[in-house]
Amino acid sequence: DRDPSTNHRFHLLLAREIFGESEIVSSALLKNSQRKAASHLTGAQLVEKIISDPKMTVERWMAMGWREKPKFRVPDTDIGLRVLAAKLKVEGDPVCTRKSHLLLAQKIFGESETLSSALLEISKHEASTLLTSAELIDRIVSDPKMRVATWIGMTQRERRRYHVPGTEMGLEALATQLEVSGNPIASHKFHLQLAQKIFGESEVLSSALLKNSRQEASLALSPADLINKVKSDPQMTLQRWIAMTQRERVGYRVPGTTMGLRALAGQLDIKGNPTNNHKFHLQLAQKIFGESEVLSSALLRNSRQEASLALSPADLINKVKSDPQMTLQRWIAMTQRERVEYRVPGTTMGLRVLATRLDVDGDPTCNRKSHLMLAQKIFDAAEWGVFPQRPN
């Protein structure tokens, strides 16, 4: 066939006659020649070319990504995976289908444990897609470790890793099979709906669905509605809010909802966690109760605490010694009440935090040895000359 409309080689030769010699035409003719030569290679010769490439191992082949597969060419040829599969009599499309891609690897590299294991996983997955909905449900409920309460309590990480027993089917595929229209890995609501399909109705499940419904309802409330709900509690004053312990902050819920402080902070545009950070808890108070002298004072105190925590051990020691009345003798003579009330000058830092910053074990407010060890860190060795009982 010398027709340039159907034969690429004669089309290129015609281009050479029209446009003259050029690097582009020469390169295209060379590639065409290589392609024609490669088309006459046997399957065994193509396999030899692949395995002679030191970079191409069975592991490398199996790790090929979806972008690499269409670009792959047998070394020194223009033959891609689809033509290679046809040459080696492998059914399917190895570019789009993992099973065909692995079967092609079997033809090239021979049997291997890694390859057999990967093909077995695919077979299990194919087998699981043939199971009926009733059979899938039966496999789940027959697992002695899987009860409705266990299912409800699954973390997102556990949901991502879950497979129906004896199959490779995950929760997304299971949801599709059981006609749950949503992603049960990303959404607790759809995870609970899937539980309904599997375990049927139960008091535990109804309670979990109600709780989830309330959570969704609370997330739909406007910031103004949430603030009003917090302030509607007659016991929740600004002073009560500021005085909350960390345990109380963790357990707090906006009245009439299941919303805790983290979610509330997110809704009110507070960029931090108010359950474990007093600063963000106070900023949240600002959003709810507005500006006030009490709140400004608490924020200033918190700011000073943060500033004192940023000081180096050397800076802290200098601040203690900058007080002309605080000598070694005065330090040793401190009563327990004075130790509890003591603050490093210019900061809100007490002795417990100071001990931690200066790597002193124990509580110096109630333990005399720890208090003396702290003194050892602060005061110069020369000052200890008059005290023969210097702590070891």
Image (tube, helix red, strand yellow):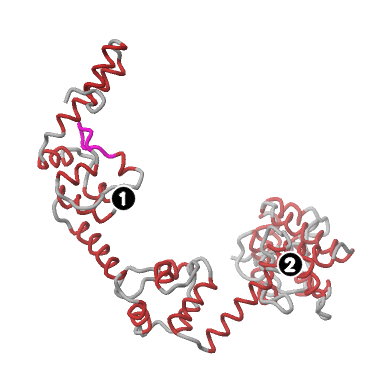
> In the rendered structure, does residue 77 fall within the stretch colored magenta?
yes
Instruction: Say which residue appears at 30% left-offset and 44% top-offset.
Output: 69
- Pointer 1 local density, CA inside 10 Å: few below 14, some 14–19, many at least 20: few
Image label count: 2
Kind of residue at badge 2: Ile
> Looking at the image, which residue is at 66% across and 55% down?
381
Q: Quadrant of residue 335?
A: bottom right
The verdict on residue 318 being magenta is: no
Vertical relation: 112 (above or below) 167: above
- Whether residue 371 is visible, yes or no, is no
Give the residue number, with chain letter if any, for mark 1. 96
Question: Residue 134, image x and y in percent?
Answer: 35, 81
**Disc nearest the viewer among 1 and 2:** 1
Q: Is residue 186 left or right of residue 243?
A: left
Left or right: 366 as drawn, with respect to 45: right
What numbered label is drawn on residue 273? none
Question: Which sits in the foreground, 75 or 344?
Answer: 75
Please, what secondary structure does the residue beneath circle 2 have?
helix
The label number, if any, that marks residue 332 in the structure image = 2
* Quarter of the image where one finds residue 26: top left
Task: State the quadrant of the N terminus.
Answer: top left
Residue 136: x and y in percent read: 35, 77
Side (left or right) of 144 relative to 52:
right
Residue 68 seen anywhere in this rendered image of the structure:
yes
Say above or below: 328 vs 226: above
Segment tinted magenta in the rendering: 72-79
> Callout 2: few (<14), some (14-19), or many (20+) C-alpha neighbours within 10 Å?
few
Judged by its main secondary structure, the magenta piece is loop
User: Mark 1: which amino acid?
Assistant: Cys
Tag 1's secondary structure? loop
Q: Give the mark nearer the N terminus: 1 vs 2.
A: 1
- x, y percentage for residue 347? 78, 58
